[in-house]
Amino acid sequence: MPPCLSPARLRVSEIFFSLQGEACRVGLPTVFVRLTGCPLRCHYCDTPYAFQGGEWMELEGIVSRVRSFATRHVTVTGGEPLAQQACGVLLGRLCDLGMDVSLETSGALPITGLDPRVARIVDIKTPGSGAMAHNHWPNLEALSPRDEIKFVLTGEADYQWARAVVAEHDLTARCPVLFSPAWGSLDATSLAEWVIRDGLPVRVQVQLHKILWGEARGR
């Protein structure tokens, strides 16, 4: 069977140990498994190196590498991790080991059918991302309280759009909602002031890893 069709292999850009820089687990020592490939090309993407390249790794090799680090927190990210069929198998295997597993996904692909122990961090792409047409809106119905929704905002127009989406779908009743400024495009203080002004029940988040290490890869 060709490597790209094998359910026991995944194409991996990198595996590294750092602090979680985003979402509700921010600041926690975490192992990151970054899978290769993504069907989107968001204007603000900070991991274009994950679009291609990487190396094929056996599932058990990935698990062994993850277990070599001194933490129970692991995040599977990309690229778009769900673009690889075996991603779901990896997530379940990590859950079976008793790890706290989160998945960072662009929201362009269905999140159903994954292990229910996985916390799914789902982007909703804004007009400023250039990828809004790829939002898979049925994902909203699949969310549980352990999941999270993230909006990456490039400016006030994105903020107003996201605010309307939150209200239309009553998103804060489904799970935590995160508003994040796109790095280099929107000042975090401006975003914070808009949220305070409007009294939105969302969490303003900044990318901790970039504050600490800038654009360094693998951090």
Image (spheres, grey):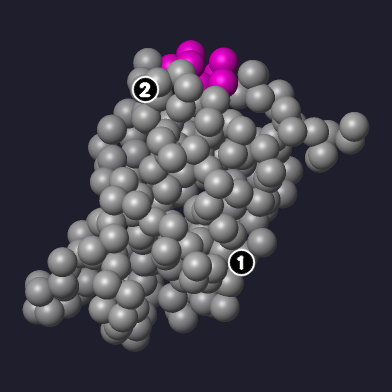
Residue 174 left/right relative to 111: left
Quadrant for the C terminus, please. top left
Which mark is nearer the camera, 2 or 1?
Answer: 2
Spot occupied by residue 212 in the image (x, y as percentages of width and height): 30, 42
The residue carrying mark 2 is 72
The reply to whether the magenta stretch includes residue 38 is: no
Residue drawn at (57%, 58%), measured in percent from left and top?
A: 110
> Which residue is at the front of the view, 125 or 185?
125
Determine if residue 163 is in view.
Answer: no
The image quadrant that residue 188 belongs to is bottom left
Does the magenta portion include 66?
yes
Q: Amino acid at mark 1?
A: Arg
Q: Nearer the viewer, residue 17 or 177?
A: 177
Residue type marked 2:
Arg
Q: Picture coordinates of residue 51 (x, y %)?
A: 67, 53
- Secondary element at image label 2: loop
Look at the magenta stretch and give its main secondary structure. Answer: helix
State whether residue 205 is above or below residue 163. Answer: above
